[in-house]
C-alpha cells in the first residue's frame, strides 16, 4: 500500500508557540492518517518535490513508499510507543 510521509509545518509552529510536543510527522494512506514523532521506513522510498501540484493538505515535499513503516509516538524521552504501520498494533513483534 502506498504511503506518503510529510512534515506538518503548522504543528511545528504551534508546538514552538505553546511548548507542546504534538507529533509533526504524518503518514498518509488511501484509508487513514497516522501521526508520529519518528517514522522508520523499512525499505525503498523516494522523496518528491511538487511545487505546482501539492498534496491536498498543502505539502509540497513528501516521501513516498510502498514499504512497511513504523510510526513512533514519543510521549516522553524515555517512554516510546511504537505503532505498526501495517496492522496498527502497539509493539507488534512481527512488525517491529
Image (spheres, rainbow, N blue to C red):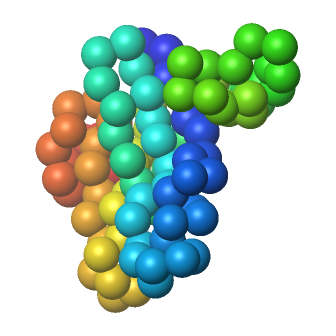
> Can residue 38 be seen at all in this image of the molecule?
no
Q: Residue at x 56, y 35 (%)?
A: 5
Q: Which of 93 and 18 is in front in this view?
A: 18
Residue 94 seen by the camera:
yes
Measuring from the top left, give residue 27's x and y in whole percent. 45, 35
The residue nearer to you, when weighing 37 against 94, is 37
Q: Which quadrant holds the N terminus? A: top left
Q: Position of residue 83 (x, y in %)?
A: 27, 50
Report the residue at 30% width, 24% height from top: 32
The image shows residue 92 at horizontal and vertical percentages of 19, 48
Point 56% across, 52% down: residue: 10
Q: In this view, does 75 lie to the left or right of 42?
A: left
Quadrant in the rendering for residue 17: bottom right
When the figure is inspected, residue 72 is found, relative to residue 87, above or below; the finding is below
Is 38 located above or below residue 21 in the figure? above
Q: Which residue is drawn at 26% across and 65% down?
A: 81
Q: Which residue lies furthest to the bottom in this view?
A: 78
Residue 51 vs residue 80, the one in the foreground: 51
Q: In the displayed structure, would residue 76 be above or below residue 55?
A: below
Image height of 7 relative to 47, above or below = below
Residue 31 spot, x, y in % from top left:
29, 16
Amino acid at each position: 500500500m502506498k504511503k506518503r510521509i510529510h512534515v506538518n509545518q503548522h504543528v511545528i509552529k504551534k508546538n514552538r508557540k505553546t511548548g507542546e510536543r504534538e507529533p509533526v510527522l504524518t503518514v498518509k494512506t488511501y484509508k487513514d492518517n497516522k501521526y508520529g514523532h519518528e517514522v522508520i521506513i523499512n525499505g525503498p522510498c523516494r522523496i518528491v518535490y511538487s511545487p505546482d501540484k501539492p498534496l491536498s493538505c498543502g505539502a509540497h515535499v513528501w516521501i513516498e513508499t510502498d514499504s512497511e513503516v513504523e510510526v513512533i509516538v514519543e510521549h516522553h524521552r524515555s517512554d516510546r510507543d511504537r505503532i505498526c504501520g501495517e496492522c496498527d498494533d502497539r509493539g507488534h513483534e512481527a512488525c517491529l
